Amino acid sequence: MSALPKDFLSFLKDLKKNNNKEWFHSNKKRYEASLKEPFKGLVGEVIHLIQKKEPEITIEPKNAIFRINRDIRFSKDKSPYKTNVGAIISAKGKKDKVYPGYYLHVESGNLMIGGGMYFVPTPDLKRMREHIAANLTQFNKLIKAKKFTNTFGELKGDANKRIPKEYKLLFEKQPLIANKQFYFTSEHDPKILLEKDPAKFIVKTMLAAKDVNDFMKEIY
């Protein structure tokens, strides 16, 4: 895939300065040409490339990309639009924010590539802890693998202050057992998107966490 248009990042920067309906409506054609359609094409190429390693991912870009409109019903911030574009690349796409997958996020000044399990309900968290406990050696090996740590650093997530007593001894060996989230992130200069074949860079980065994601998928 060719580079994204230079106005892709410029539009996000301008939107951040002019986050109102009047400006957006007067720049609707620019939004379509410089942001919406190019990002749709990028996500489509990412899905196509990642299918070679993860054939279960057969979603369309529309099933992965989040709407640019913000839900302001319960927010003090009444800005009508997001100042970023984002997509969940997984077998289930944006409709299932629990299932392990990859996340692509672009805003002015930042390209973030990540994934894992961010929204983890109690039943899934219980299964994940049991899975880690039963496969601790494998888990430690995966999160310490060079291709993962060189790209994402470490597995992250907020931790519970209290954990079930049956995990207290395991917590001393592996503190991540207390986590209520298991995700990874890698931040880059978004100008990469303006260079040749940005989808290849994104997919290569994502696949550095494939083994970790695959481990998480085993709880389902």
Image (cartoon, helix red, strand yellow):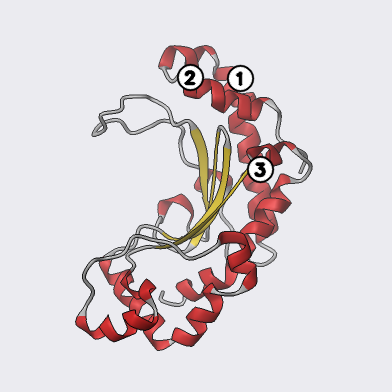
**Crowd band around label 2 with a 10 angstrom C-alpha radius: few (<14), some (14–19), many (20+):** few
Cα separation between marks 3 and 1: 17 Å
User: Is the residue 153 above or below the residue 136 in the image?
Assistant: above
Label 2 secondary element: helix
Cα separation between marks 2 and 1: 16 Å
Name the kind of residue labelled 3 in the image: Leu
Name the kind of residue labelled 2 in the image: Lys
* Residue denoted by label 2: 17
Q: Which numbered disc covers residue 140?
A: none
| Disc nearer the start of the sequence (2/1) | 2
| Disc nearer the start of the sequence (2/3) | 2
Q: Which numbered disc covers residue 42?
A: 3
* Residue denoted by label 1: 30
**Do the residues under discs 3 and 1 have CB atoms within 8 angstroms?**
no
Q: Residue at x 49, y 86 (%)?
A: 137
Quadrant assignment for the N terminus:
top right
Q: Position of residue 192 (x, y in %)?
A: 70, 41
Cα separation between marks 2 and 3: 25 Å
Q: Residue at x 63, y 71 (%)?
A: 146
